[in-house]
Image: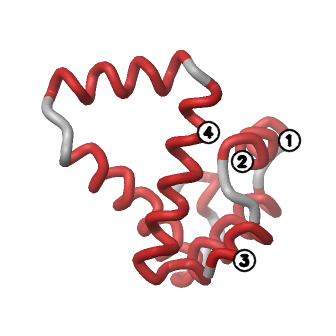
């Protein structure tokens, strides 16, 4: 298991999977060319990356996985190194934001 996931519990894992499955749902609606441009835009624009990650979090919440996502985000913030913590804080919904949207 990846180092970042050591010690994760089932509720937190559900939060991670809900977020990642929400990404897959978005990608499945794109054709190959759209997906390439989407990926290039994601990699080249901080604002777009933030928009994508936050809207993906919101999709997971809308599907009923708010508690699980909140628990996962809290887990990652506690276990992340400084670099990863800055990425989480910059691009993703915070625990309080998730709680407010649940």
CA gap between label 4 and label 3 equals: 19 Å
Q: Position of residue 23 (x, y in %)?
A: 37, 51
Instruction: Mark 4 vs mark 2: give the one in front.
Output: 4
* Mark sitting on residue 82: 1
Please determine whether, in this image, residue 51 is positioned above or below residue 67. above
Of the numbered discs 2 and 1, the one sitting upstream in the chain is: 1
Please determine whether, in this image, residue 16 is positioned above or below residue 48. below
Of the numbered discs 4 and 3, the one sitting upstream in the chain is: 4
Instruction: Mark 2 vs mark 1: give the one in front.
Output: 2
* Mark sitting on residue 88: 2
Instruction: Mark 2 vs mark 3: give the one in front.
Output: 3
Q: What residue is shown with label 3? A: 100
Compare residues 57 and 10 and report the one nearer the observer. Answer: 57
* In this rendering, position of residue 26 left or right of residue 99: left
Asked which quadrant contains residue 46, the reply is: top right
Of the numbered discs 2 and 3, the one sitting upstream in the chain is: 2
Q: What residue is shown with label 4? A: 50
* Mark sitting on residue 92: none
CA gap between label 2 and label 3 equals: 18 Å
Q: Residue at point 56% right, 34% down?
A: 49
The residue sitting at the right extreme is: 82
Q: Where is residue 97 in the image (x, y as percent from the top left)?
A: 74, 67
Disc 3 crowd rating (10 Å Cα; few below 14, some 14-19, many 20+) is few
* In this rendering, position of residue 28 left or right of residue 73: left
* In this rendering, position of residue 83 left or right of residue 30: right
């Amino acid at each position: 298991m990846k180092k970042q996931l050591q010690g994760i519990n089932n509720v937190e894992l559900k939060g991670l999977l809900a977020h990642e499955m929400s990404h897959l749902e978005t990608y499945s609606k794109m054709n190959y060319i759209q997906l390439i441009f989407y990926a290039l835009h994601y990699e080249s624009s901080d604002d777009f990356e933030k928009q994508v990650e936050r809207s993906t979090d919101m999709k997971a919440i809308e599907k009923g996985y708010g508690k699980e996502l909140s628990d996962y985000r809290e887990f990652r913030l506690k276990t992340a190194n400084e670099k990863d913590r800055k990425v989480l804080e910059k691009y993703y919904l915070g625990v309080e934001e998730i709680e407010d949207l649940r």
